[in-house]
Image: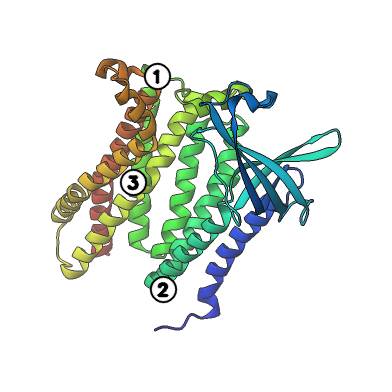
C-alpha cells in the first residue's frame, strides 16, 4: 500500500468538489423549474381507453392503459420537503417510465394560475453517476498513483476548456473550425506537459498532435468546399438550428470532427514519442533514419486499432438509426446518400486522415530533435 500526501490528494478533492458543485447547481437552481423527488407511494390502476381524459388524446396504443397515482416528496428546489401528487400514465409506449416506491425521479413543473404543477420527466440518474464517477476516480488514483492524478487533472482542464471556451465561442458565432484548431492547440499544450512533464517527449507529442490536427483541419476545409453537407443531418442539429439560424452549421460539423479526433491523435503521438525515447535510451547511437523508421513501424502497429476505435465510436453513436434503416431494407445507395450517414463517413475519414498524418510527423520530429540533442 502507499500513502497519499495532501498535495497528491488535492486534485482528487478538487475534481470531486467540482462534480458536487455541478450537482447542486442543477438541483437547486430556481430559474429552472426542475427538481429531484422520491416516490413515497404508488397506486396503479388499469383503465380502458374510453376512460382516458382529454389530455391523453391519441397517445393510447391499446384498448387499456395503466395510470399510476404517485405521492412524491420533493428533495430539491424551492419546494424542498413538499409532498405532491402526480399522475403517471403508462400507454405501452417505449418512453413510458414505470415507477416503484422508493425510486428517485427527475421532476419538471410549470406554473398554472400561480400553482406549481409537477410531472415526472425521468428517473434521477445523477446520484448513480456521481457514485460511478467517484469509483472511477478512486480506481485511477489507486492504479495510476501520481500519474493517475495527473490524468484526472488533465481531464478536468480539457472539460473546462471545452465547456467554458469552445462552446461559448461557437454560440457567439466565431468561426467553428478556427476555434476547434485553437482549442486543440490549448488542450495539447496544457495537458501533455502535465502528464509527461516539460520534457522532450512532451514537446514531440505536442508537435505530432498539432500536425495531425492541422492536416485534419485542412481536409475539413476541402470536404466542406466540395461536399453539399450543411451540418443539419441530425434531428438535434435541426432543432438547434431552428432558433440559431445565424450560426455556421457546416463549420460546427467539421469543428466537431476535429475535436472528436483530438484524443486519438494525441494517443498516437504520445505512443510514438514514448516508444522512440525508449529506443534512444537503450541505443544512444541509433541514427536519424533508423529512429524515424522505428517510429513509422510503431505507428503502423497503432494505426489499425486506432482507426477501428474512431470508426466504431462513430458507428456506435448512430447505431439506432442504422438499425431502423436496415430494418426497412433501404438500398445501399440510398442509405449512403442520407445526410447523417454521409456526415458519419466524412467524420471517420477526416479523423482517420489526421491520425495517419500524426504518425510520420511525430516520427520525423522525434528523429530530428533527438539528433539535435545528440549533436549538442
Along the viewing direction, whichever of 346 and 49 lies nearer the viewer: 49
Examine the rendered structure and indicate whether residue 148 appears above or below residue 102.
below
Residue of label 3: 265
Residue of label 2: 142
Which percent across, then down, holds residue 327? 31, 25
Residue in the image at 30% along x and 40% along y = 312
Q: Quadrant of residue 111?
A: top right
Which percent across, then down, holds residue 243? 63, 24
Which percent across, then down, holds residue 62? 51, 26
Q: Is the residue marked by circle 2 packed among few (<14), some (14-19), or many (20+) residues within 10 Å?
A: some
* Label 1 or label 2, whichever comes before in sequence order: 2
Q: Quadrant of residue 274?
A: bottom left
Label 2 secondary element: helix
Examine the rendered structure and indicate whether residue 228 appears above or below residue 208.
above
Label 1 secondary element: helix
* Distance in Å between CA atoms under marks 2 and 3: 27 Å
Instruction: Mark 1 vs mark 2: give the one in front.
Output: 2
Q: Quadrant of residue 246?
A: top right
Which percent across, then down, holds residue 252? 49, 30
Instruction: Mark 2 vs mark 3: give the one in front.
Output: 2
Q: Is the residue marked by circle 3 packed among few (<14), some (14-19), or many (20+) residues within 10 Å?
A: many
Examine the rendered structure and indicate whether residue 171 appears above or below residue 195.
above
Tell me the quarter of the image containing the C terminus.
bottom left
* Label 3 or label 1, whichever comes before in sequence order: 1
Residue of label 1: 225
Residue in the image at 59% along x and 58% along y = 19
295 sits to left or right of 263 = left
* Distance in Å between CA atoms under marks 3 and 1: 24 Å
Amino acid at each position: 500500500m502507499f500513502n497519499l500526501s495532501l498535495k497528491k490528494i488535492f486534485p482528487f478533492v478538487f475534481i470531486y468538489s467540482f462534480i458536487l458543485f455541478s450537482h447542486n447547481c442543477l438541483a437547486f437552481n430556481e430559474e429552472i423549474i426542475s427538481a429531484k423527488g422520491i416516490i413515497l407511494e404508488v397506486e396503479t390502476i388499469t383503465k380502458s381507453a374510453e376512460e382516458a381524459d382529454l389530455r391523453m388524446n391519441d397517445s393510447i396504443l391499446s384498448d387499456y392503459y395503466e395510470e399510476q397515482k404517485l405521492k412524491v416528496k420533493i428533495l430539491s428546489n424551492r419546494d424542498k420537503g413538499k409532498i405532491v401528487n402526480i399522475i403517471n400514465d403508462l400507454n405501452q409506449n417505449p418512453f413510458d417510465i414505470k415507477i416503484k416506491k422508493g425510486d428517485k425521479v427527475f421532476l419538471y413543473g410549470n406554473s398554472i394560475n400561480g400553482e406549481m404543477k409537477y410531472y415526472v420527466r425521468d428517473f434521477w440518474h445523477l446520484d448513480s453517476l456521481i457514485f460511478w464517477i467517484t469509483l472511477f476516480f478512486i480506481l485511477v488514483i489507486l492504479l495510476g498513483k501520481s500519474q493517475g492524478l495527473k490524468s484526472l487533472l488533465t481531464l478536468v482542464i480539457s472539460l473546462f476548456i471545452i465547456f467554458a471556451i469552445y462552446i461559448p465561442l461557437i454560440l457567439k458565432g466565431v468561426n467553428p473550425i478556427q476555434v476547434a484548431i485553437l482549442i486543440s492547440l490549448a488542450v495539447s499544450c496544457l495537458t501533455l506537459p502535465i502528464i509527461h512533464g516539460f520534457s522532450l517527449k512532451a514537446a514531440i507529442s505536442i508537435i505530432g498532435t498539432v500536425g495531425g490536427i492541422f492536416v485534419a483541419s485542412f481536409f475539413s476545409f476541402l470536404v466542406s468546399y466540395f461536399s453539399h453537407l450543411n451540418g443539419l443531418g441530425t434531428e438535434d442539429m435541426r432543432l438547434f438550428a431552428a432558433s440559431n439560424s445565424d450560426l455556421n452549421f457546416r463549420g460546427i460539423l467539421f469543428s466537431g470532427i476535429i475535436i472528436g479526433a483530438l484524443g486519438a491523435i494525441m494517443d498516437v503521438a504520445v505512443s510514438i514519442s514514448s516508444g522512440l525515447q525508449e529506443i534512444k535510451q537503450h541505443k544512444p547511437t541509433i541514427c536519424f533514419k533508423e529512429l524515424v523508421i522505428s517510429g513509422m513501424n510503431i505507428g503502423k502497429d497503432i494505426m489499425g486499432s486506432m482507426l477501428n476505435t474512431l470508426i466504431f465510436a462513430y458507428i456506435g453513436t448512430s447505431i439506432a438509426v442504422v438499425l431502423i434503416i436496415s430494418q426497412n431494407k433501404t438500398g445501399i445507395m440510398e442509405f449512403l446518400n442520407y445526410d447523417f450517414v454521409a456526415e458519419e463517413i466524412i467524420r471517420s475519414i477526416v479523423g482517420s486522415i489526421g491520425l495517419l498524418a500524426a504518425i510520420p510527423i511525430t516520427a520525423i520530429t522525434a528523429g530530428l530533435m533527438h539528433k539535435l540533442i545528440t549533436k549538442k
